[in-house]
Image (spheres, rainbow, N blue to C red):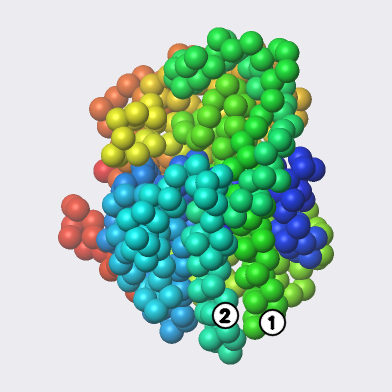
Amino acid sequence: MTDATRWDLLGSYRAAGIDTPHLDRLARSGVRFERAYTTQPVCAPARSALFTGTWPHTNGTWSNNLAPGLDVPTLGQRLRDRSITAAYIGKWHLDGTDYFGNGRCPDGWDPEYWYDMRTYLEELSPEERRASRDPATVEDPGVPEEFTYAHRCTERAVEFLEDHEDDSFLLVVSYDEPHDPGITPPQYAEKYRDFVFPHDENVLDDLADKPRHQRVWAGPRLAEDRDDGFERRDPRYFAAQEFVDAQIGQVLAAVEAHAPGALIVYTSDHGDMLASHRLYAKGPAMYDEIARVPLLMRMPGTASGAVAPHPVSHIDIAPTVLEHMGMDVPALMPGKSLVPVLAEPARRVNDEVFVEFGRYEVDHDGFGGFQPMRGVFDGRFKLVVNLLSDDELYDLADDPGELRNLLHDPGCSPRRNRLHDRLLAWMNETRDPFRGSCWERRPWRADAREDTWSYDGLTRQRPDDPGYQPRLLDYTTGLEMTETVRRK
């Protein structure tokens, strides 16, 4: 996986001019998921879903600098407990500390190969550490490939594959690139020095009918005159995407040499706004620029160059891994295995996919602070409820740039309300700790129920997770619960 790769940075999704030959070859030899979505467009929450199979609001990582709860096993623990080696090489961002991690291998993952970003920094001198975080290093003095984090992750990944070619295993190679500072050998940056990434009409969005918090996020960009000659340039970002593609190519070559029967999964944690809707980076929005992610999979027997057109989610990755390994998927995991889609790419496993947001980062006061968001996408319409701001509805078939907010369009209200009902049901089904009548009683929902203190009046206990937690007990009897959802 990479960090902050927009879906359309890959040539297999869009011919935008960035060279990604190795990932494009993976797409041609496997299945490309056309509509894949992150669970939350921020690093740690997205990773929490990938590696626990549970929603950020469920596992406790609803912001950066928060770690999953102690009662939420990771894929590494689940596989280790079945005597399957699990190795994690690269950015982890799930120990609740800072961007780089604490340098300690989490339970379940092989400590011999563990290599988070703090481990990398501790290999460097103080001067080298500063250089590794300074974007100007690309220009002066420049760095050899061997200096970069991506290269050192690749070296360890290839070594792992050489050492485990006769074993069943899970290997995660988690690159930081193309996330800033985008340190790459200078020839990559030089190649993209004058490159202009194609822009869509939504870079001109004035956000007039959009949530207020987005206008605050855009800030001075709202006043920019973009009608004449606007260009999207970011040489380091685009260069880092080609550089990390080359690193992935080395890992793929090692997979083909040492584990040709492996299931290969490539994705990114989220995208980057890149000035679309006059926004930057990522945050509390469900626009495709940050919520939609590249997702490629390949295993022997999959159709080469197939496209899976229906919505899928990062929440589906952990069940896919477990089913592929021949393991049961616990009720605790709400996702759907994508193994059937690999056999039949036109198969639809999700009626809808969901995206959430809580906070960008605990350590920062900025980035909008607490911005609770819950969104749902059914393959055409996307509804986003911004609890402290204004809500959104888009028809991506007619408006792929998500320029026209149809929330108050009378012709769309039946579809909007159905999506809203499904969103509320999902919050209940997943035991969202932030659920409640405030999400139902939106100004545009005329038929919302009256507030009551008990709301739905139900107890919703955690689903079973055999081998990790005993069956929960009923508060009123002290006996094992008979149903997870029941009247209080």
The residue that appears at 62% across and 26% down in the rendered structure is 276
Instruction: Residue 346: name its quadrant.
Output: bottom right
Mark 2, Cα crowd under 10 Å, few <14 / some 14-19 / many 20+, is many
Q: Position of residue 88 (x, y in %)?
A: 45, 68
SS at circle 1: helix
Q: Nearer the viewer, residue 421 or 115?
A: 115
User: Viewed as shown, does residue 286 lie left or right of 204?
Assistant: left
The residue that appears at 36% across and 42% down in the rendered structure is 63
Q: Position of residue 142 (x, y in %)?
A: 55, 52
User: Viewed as shown, does residue 349 lie left or right of 457?
Assistant: right
Mark 1, Cα crowd under 10 Å, few <14 / some 14-19 / many 20+, is few
Q: In which quadrant will I find the N terminus?
A: bottom right
**In the rendered view, would you say 482 is above or below 155?**
above
SS at circle 2: helix
**Mark 1, residue position:** 257
Q: Position of residue 183 (x, y in %)?
A: 53, 50
Q: Nearer the viewer, residue 479 or 52?
A: 52
Instruction: Residue 481: name its quadrant.
Output: bottom left
Instruction: Residue 190: name its quadrant.
Output: top right
The residue that appears at 34% across and 28% down in the rendered structure is 366
